[in-house]
Amino acid sequence: MIEGPIWSIGCGNMAGAMLRRWLETGLDPAQLTIIRKSGAPFAEGVTVLDSAPPDGAVPAMVLLGVKPQMIDAVAPWLAPLLAPETLLVSILAGVDLAALRQRFPTPHTIVRAMPNTPVVIGQGVVALCTDGIAEEERIAGLMAPLGLVEWVDESLFDAVTALAGSGPAFLFRFIDALAAAGADVGLDPAQAERMAIATVAGAGLLAAGSEESPGALADRVASPGGSTRKGLDVLDQPEALRPLLRDTLQAAILRNREMAAAAR
């Protein structure tokens, strides 16, 4: 964990999920200062301010957790407060390292991170890229309590953002649709939802712990000529699930690229 003051600039759903997990896994609340306009409290022992600390303190780490379009409102007052040793971690979707470096020239290391919301229970995915190669081990250690940590070339960051960053929302929608389909075929809606959630949770754990691919696991469930196979035949049609998900990711990637262009 980082030694010294940690600032979070903004604290939306994603930044809040990361911070809560870090606090649960040993971060001293006294180290953490959240700077957000609302000044709303966050957790016991955590300082929350509506502007930068007045005492001239220099943060050891800064988590940029504002909306991407707010970067130019934040950078003018934040950049002068950072030291070369400050580790700057950005979770701003679509804002690349070059755009960050242009606005924050002082820190030796800037990290671009793309977490997803299950980091709050330590079961998330955090994709990383950085312009401070010597810091990779320390950064990976910092992110380890959040879940799976993957270093990714920045050229692939939009794809990672669409798959892992947005993926929980897509999966939640799938669970909702699976439950609705259960209700459509006669199950009580609340019961169908409970069963859909448990089915996806169990299948996910099984896939995570198996040496077989998810595709092989699907085929293992599906007996030749059985009911599961008939259902898979619908999902496996050329115009069905795979192209739908590809189009879903492409739409998210396009939006990330639009935000990146706006931040340059």
Image (spheres, rainbow, N blue to C red):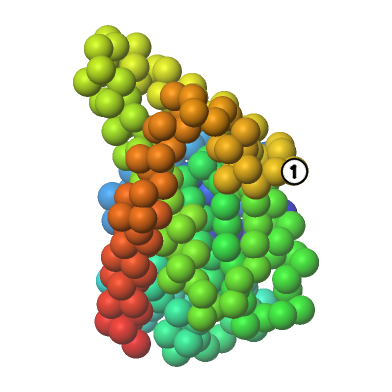
Rendered view: 178 above or below 136: above
Q: Residue at x 27, y 26 (%)?
A: 181
Q: Residue at x 36, y 49 (%)?
A: 237
Rendered view: 228 above or below 240: above
Residue 20 on image: x %, y %: 53, 41
Residue on which the image places disc 1: 211
Q: Nearer the viewer, residue 118 or 76?
A: 118
Residue 102 on image: x %, y %: 45, 89
Residue 177 on image: x %, y %: 29, 33
Specify the quadrant that holds the N terminus: bottom right
Residue 231 occupies quadrant: top left
Q: Specify few, some or many for label 1: CA neighbours under 10 Å numbering under 14, 14-19, or 20 or more.
A: few
Q: Is residue 9 visible?
A: no
Q: Nearer the viewer, residue 186 or 65?
A: 186
Q: Secondary structure at mark 1?
A: loop
Residue 58 on image: x %, y %: 58, 70
